[in-house]
Amino acid sequence: MSVRADRKKCLSCAGCVAVCPVNALTLNGQRIEADDPTCTNCNACVLFCPVGCLKIVETPNDSSAAKAALIRLKADGKV
Amino acid sequence: MTSIDEKLMKEEWDVIVVGAGPGGNIAARDCAKSGLKTLVIDKRQELGTPVRCGEGLAEGWFKMVGLPTDPKYCVQEIWGAAMYMPNEKQTIVSVEQRGFVLERKIWEKELGKIGSRAGAKYLLKTMVIDVIKDENGYPTGVKIRNHYGDHVIKCKLIIAVDGVDSQTARFYGINSFNPLNEVDSGYQYNMANLKFERPDLIHLWLGNEICPRGYIWLFPKGDDVANVGIGVIGSSEKTAKQYLDDWIEAHPAIFKDATIIEENCGCIPVGKPMDKLYDNGFMICGDAGHMVNPIHGGGIGESMVAAQLAAKTAKEAFEAGDLSKDFLKRYSDQWWELRGNQLVNIWKVRRFFEKLNDDDLNFVGEMLTPQTILDFSEGKKLKTLGKMFIKRPKLLAIAAKTILKD
């Protein structure tokens, strides 16, 4: 799992970069980029975002444990 | 043909300043004035934009770092603040020394001119993607990425002034991330055709319903133009934008005919300053080191003052031929004495206020005077302030755990 920014909403403030505990996010130009293997899906950036533009998504190399965790998060209405 | 900025990448520098905000420009100005060969790197293509700031700054900060003021970027004089508690009780705090609401898009370019005239060079639209160190742990350069590709630019000393989302310190090996409960999520509109009184005051609204932990602000930039923004706790239930939009909708007298002419947002580090502000060949200033007033969220002045101290230390370190952390420690020591300890006291005040519900806030609002508000916002006379709550055991208990605690 990792995070993606909705570019229609994102104002490129990079606050998500500031609150990421593992430095998985970078502001490249106006685009927020996530290093998928580094992201721990902690949700800090999602909660922080002033415009609510981030969400946790599945990525191709997700482990079965990660997939299960995402299903739980969805069931809890957290993503 | 080699362009001006491409040539910069091939040279060796004494100092690389990462970030061309207010602090970065002061560091650049002062390092260059000291005769240090100084390069400023910024990932933006233009100084001053995008704005991530309410743009308020007291004149005292300009004086502290030797900067001029000019109406072309000091677009509104401010002589105090109007505070509104949850019950809408208004308290006006006047100040003896004026402040300004700035037009940072203009001001930061002026700062860039000042740094440039002092001899510093600027390399824009360039991301720092790593810090290169030698076997002894001293930086030898930064790895950058721009439209020329990836390059290493050599230097001896790095000053990281690259804002709340600083990655330079992390590339160096200092984890400068901000815990979610120690940041505010900020959102702001620049609006025109507003209707409000007293453009000579900044206007601040408090309340857990409208804005958990933080406040909503209206910073005038003329009689009917203002920055209207909000800072809420990073982990808040709704987004900062939702809180602000709800509040605007509830105040048609101000906003009925208003138009949004700009929107921006950002992260405000309202926790304690970072303990580790230096290492071998490395110093951190400003938001990158969490140097922000935890009550009002202002960080421009803090960053400039820290940068001034860092540049002074850089000069002394090069003169002594010693860029070790043992030498650079004096920057941190001086900064903590000048600003850090006071910011920690202000952080205690923030911790006190964030534990109050709206009834408590209204009660405190009845007791506050303009002077006590000033004392609170500056983290001063905390013991005396704590005694104000002696007749309200709940507040006294909170005060004992926050503002009265050493």
Image: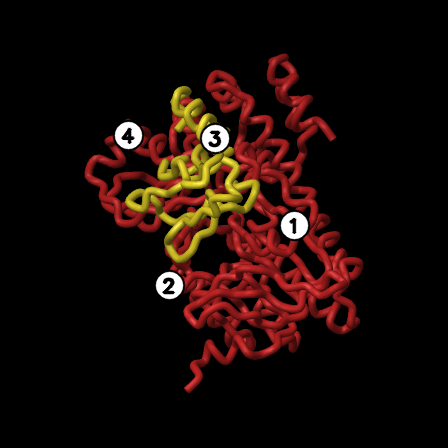
Q: Return the residue found at the far left.
A: B257
Check the image and report above or below for B288 versus B186: below
Chain to which the residue tagged by mark 3 belongs: A
Q: Is residue B297 visible?
A: no
Q: Residue at x 69, y 43 (%)?
A: B341
Residue type for callout 1: Ile
Q: Pointers 4 and 1 in contact (CB under 8 A)?
A: no
The correct choice, above or below, for B153 with respect to B405 in the image is: below
Q: Which residue is mark 1?
A: B174
**Residue B88 image position (x, y, % from top left):** 39, 24
Identify which amino acid the numbered label 4 is placed on: His
Q: Which hue is chain A drawn in?
A: yellow
Q: Which residue is mark 4?
A: B251
Quick one: SS at disc 3? helix
Q: Marks 4 and 1, Cα distance to the nearest angstrom?
A: 44 Å
Q: Report which colour depicts chain B.
A: red
Disc 2 and disc 1 in contact, CB within 8 angstroms:
no
Distance from label 2 to label 1 (Cα)?
A: 39 Å
Specify which label sits upstream in the sequence, 4 or 1. Answer: 1
Which residue type carries mark 3? Ser
Where disc 4 sits, the SS reads loop
List the residue tagged with mark 2: B72
